[in-house]
Amino acid sequence: MEQDIRQAYATTEPAGGLRVHLITFGCQMNEYDTHLVRSELAGLGASFVETTEEANFVLVNTCAVRGKPVEKLRSLLGELRKQKHRQPLLVGVMGCVAQLPEGQDMARKFEVDILLGPGALTQIGRAIEADHKFWDLSFRDDLNTFTPPPPQGVLSSFVSIIRGCNHHCTYCIVPRTRGPEISRHPDDILKEVQAQKDAGVLEVTLLGQNVNSYGKGRSGYPSFAELLKLVGQIGVNRIKFITSHPVNFTDDIVRAIAETPQVARYVHLPVQSGSDRVLKRMAREYTRDWYLNRIQAIRASISEVVISTDIIVGFPGETEEDFQETLSLYEQVGYDHSYMFIYSPRPGTPSYLHFEDLPREIKVERLQRLIETQKRWSYERNRAWVGRTVEVLVHGRAKETGYAEGHDRGNRPILLPVNEAPKPGLYTAIVKQATPHLLLAERHTTLEPIGSQA
Ligand code: SAM
Ligand code: SF4
């Protein structure tokens, strides 16, 4: 049956008969990679559909950072295999899980036709033209020079600036799945940002596992701080970046944020734990004091900066005293918000191989306490904005009826009455009310009309 679909698209227009359903698990980097593959498929004449039932090609971009998305993938592939037995269907898996032995076992078990590692995405065209199962797990240079066309009809978008990771955090699967760091050429980055701006994008997020390492070891490349300034000159309304590693968050980066008005006053600086003992077992390469010194430098130079973090609760060997250190770090920093994860043992990582996992009840109970702490701080930080004017980038309607949703330059979620912000675009608004999770605001003026905005 697989053969029938492959034959359905003629050689002159290889993907002409393909109806593709794309599914993305995971981070913003994966969203960007899905866009990249989508643009390749569109160039080959494929069309895109919203459900697996309408599709004759289902392609899943996967995430291996925690166990949950991997399990979700397993059950999805089980469903797709059943569908494959009822009707002609190509199934492809790309991204981090494809790179791992567990992904390759799944591919065999669930009759997956195409398997592309995160370094081989440019091979999608060859993969669908092949008349056999197609696996490519190599890290290809052409990925780094590939510039996808700007997405259409969106106000916020991503640009990849560096792929891979040279760190070796003991819990993390990323260095295995995404390989060593490779910075993109600055000309390609600037061209892509310019093209996105020309297409109407108002907010660009620069992406990488460690954006601060940008340019290291590449002669003639700017540093990350210099790149921020160069991107700033293009004149996109907002520039954000994720993710930063505290050990590379140098003073020149702090200055570049402070001195470049287009760069949002928002820093996401993952700490992972407040305990030096745990940080050492995680191989994070910094101490609590180092991290706090970076926070101090950021707060001293960037007024009204919004700071968020990532944290792993219940790392193997984390004692109640270690966890208290994390709680006290939260009190010291007062994060605006944070992404809080329960430790998930990932096969093949050093912590999986050498450390014993804590009982789930302990991990869950600690996470609950941390969530409460964060909630209190988020409310505290959000409350300080009541009565003030904020710039809101409205994306669309919120689930709550009667509201449009967007976020401000600090990435805080904001709701506006939908009749006051009827179309996506930039508005200024006055904050009327705060909750721990969002701000409720009323429109003040329209900053910049977008399309048919009122
Ligand atoms: N490079 C970034 C850094 O070092 O901060 C983070 C990238 S990682 C893909 C995103 C987040 O996932 C990490 O900051 C960490 O909090 C979380 N994470 C990674 N491995 C994890 C694991 N095994 N269990 C739970 N959370 C994990
Ligand atoms: Fe993973 Fe650490 Fe690299 Fe971040 S810095 S991607 S947590 S290994």
Image: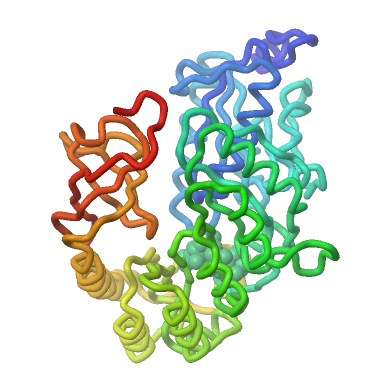
Coloring basis for residues:
rainbow
The image quarter containing residue 56 is top right
* Along the line of sight, the residue nearer the viewer: 393 or 379: 393
Tell me: residue 218, above or below residue 7: below
Q: Is residue 247 above or below residue 405?
A: below
Residue 431 coordinates in the image, percent (x, y)? 19, 55
Q: Is residue 167 visible?
A: yes
Instruction: Kindly identify the residue that appears in the image at 47 percent across and 78 percent down.
Output: 301
Q: Is residue 389 left or right of residue 170?
A: left
> Does any portion of residue 365 appear in the rendered image?
no
Determine whether 428 is above or below 420 in the image.
below
Q: Residue furthest right?
A: 219
Q: Tell me the quarter of the image containing the N terminus.
A: top right
Place of residue 273 in the rendered image (x, y in percent of width and height, measured from the top left): 44, 80
Tell me which corner region of the image, top left, top right, bottom left or bottom right, holds residue 426: top left
**Residue 82: percent from the left, percent from the top?**
49, 25
The residue depicted at 70 percent of the width and 42 percent of the height is: 191
Q: Quadrant of the C terminus?
A: top left
Pick the front one: 304 or 45: 304
Left or right: where 377 falls relative to 293: left
Q: How many numbered marks, from 0 up?
A: 0
Q: Residue at x 66, y 57 (%)?
A: 230
Question: Does residue 43 appear to the left or right of 334 in the view shown?
Answer: right
- Residue 353 lies, in percent from the top left, at 59, 73
At 20% from the left and 52% from the top, the residue drawn is 430
